[in-house]
Amino acid sequence: MSEKAYEVVHLDELDRFPVDDEGLLWRPVRRRLGITAFGTNAYTAEQGTERVIEEHSEQDGHEELYFVAGGRATFVLGDDEIDAPAGTFIYAEPGTKRGAVAAEPNTTVLAIGAKRGVPHEISAWEEIFVVFGLYRRGDKAEARAHMEKVLEKHPDAWQGYYNAACLDALDRNRDGAIEHLRRAIELDPQAKEYAAKDEDFDWLRDDPEFPA
Amino acid sequence: MSGTANVTELALRLGNGPSWAMVRTHFDIQAFGVNAYIAEEPGISVIEEHDELGERAGRHEELYFVSSGRATFTINDDEVDAPEGTFVFVRDPAAKRTAIAQEAGTTIVIVGGKPGEAFIPSPWERNAEGLVHFANEDWEQAVETYERFLEETPGDAGFLYNLACAESRLGRKEKALEHLRLSAEGEERFRHAAVGDPDFDAVRDDPEFSAITGQVDAPGAGS
């Protein structure tokens, strides 16, 4: 990471990682610019009918502010439905259900988040998101190489091995999936519970060596 | 409390400068700082020159997002053309940064926080409560607010300056000049700021005003 006093990037120059099969794109802002004090991402729905913010509640105490940077979206915030043209801020307290579906092509929503009262910690999920984003857009070798880096960086975290197993499973790599899943379960038995319900492993479930 | 607002609904016009949307205070966000500025006309300084090192600053990393229009940023000695959709991230709190709007309606969203520390609002942001009264031209409420701030932070030059502005607007010339003098003694920049500030029109011809400002020539500055 350069230690230049400042960085400049245009929205169009940000990476575009598919989040799902419906067209939602994750555009990492924090990661690209090296921001450390708060989380920032952009999400783009190109077609204009797909989800642009997954419906979820922040259960870990993150406050989140969304800003419709372009296009238009229909937000759900708690029990309310909100028409949000460009220029709209939507603030969601921790625990409040929120989500959004694009109402125009090329709708882009910025999401800014951090936890109150504590220094911001960069989430490890970001790199896992990159792995699967690379995979979904067809850069499979790069996805595997990035997964290896995540495992090197977090050698004792079950989540890394679990996601490596998922990647292997998507790639129909039986041996890799079983080995990584075994390691994840060794590190934390809850990996077994997740694997038992994870459809990524459906094709492997009847294998006598499948550990979940 | 969770909620929603459009940036234009939050924008308050303050003096001759850009409109200020106090996003953080509107939603009572506690985890990071966030504001937006809108320049109604090109040529307006939509981001005032500043760094993040001063007593009133928070030593924040700052992310600027040009959500509409176009601005020219100057960061240290570099000029950056920033059309709609540009992110400018200033990580160095010592970097001097400013932005001039190139188009009417140029809007910049700013997010800030201090790396490695829990967020606390920058001291300058306390001004927000008082500046709302300026935007509404409710000078009595502005006086009351800044008197309260000064009870909590005696001698704060910025609060003294804004108190003087409101008192001048109310025609309380003696008090306005007294507080302006104290403000200028505290921070030299307020001596210059007062010269072009229309809030002081009521006391501009008073010899005491000339004595405080030292007859300096300086660009105008709103409250």
Image (tube, rainbow, N blue to C red):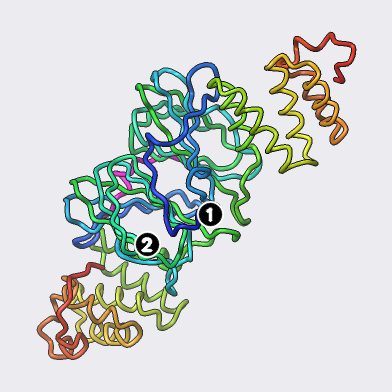
Region of the chain picked out in magenta, as a range:
B3-12
Task: Provide residue B103's location: percent of width, then percent of height.
Answer: 19, 46
Q: Residues within 10 Å of mark 1 (few under 14, many from 20)?
A: some
- Give the farthest residue toward the left: B205
User: What residue is drawn where x is 17% and y is 55%?
Assistant: B43
Tell me the distance, in whole angstroms, between the alpha carbons under discs 1 and 2: 15 Å
Q: Is residue A198 above or below residue A91?
A: above
- Which residue does the numbered mark 1 point to in the structure image? B30
Q: Which of the two discs, 1 and 2, labels the residue nearer the N terminus?
A: 1
Task: Provide residue A79's location: percent of width, then percent of height.
Answer: 52, 29
User: What residue is drawn where x is 21% and y is 77%?
Assistant: B194
Query: What amino acid does circle 1 point to?
Result: Gln
Query: What amino acid does circle 2 point to?
Result: Ala
A72 within the magenta span: no
Pick the residue in front: B181 or B117: B117
Pick the residue in front: A164 or B219: A164
- Which residue does the numbered mark 2 point to in the structure image? B128
Quarter assignment of residue B128: bottom left
Task: Output the chain of dot 2.
Answer: B
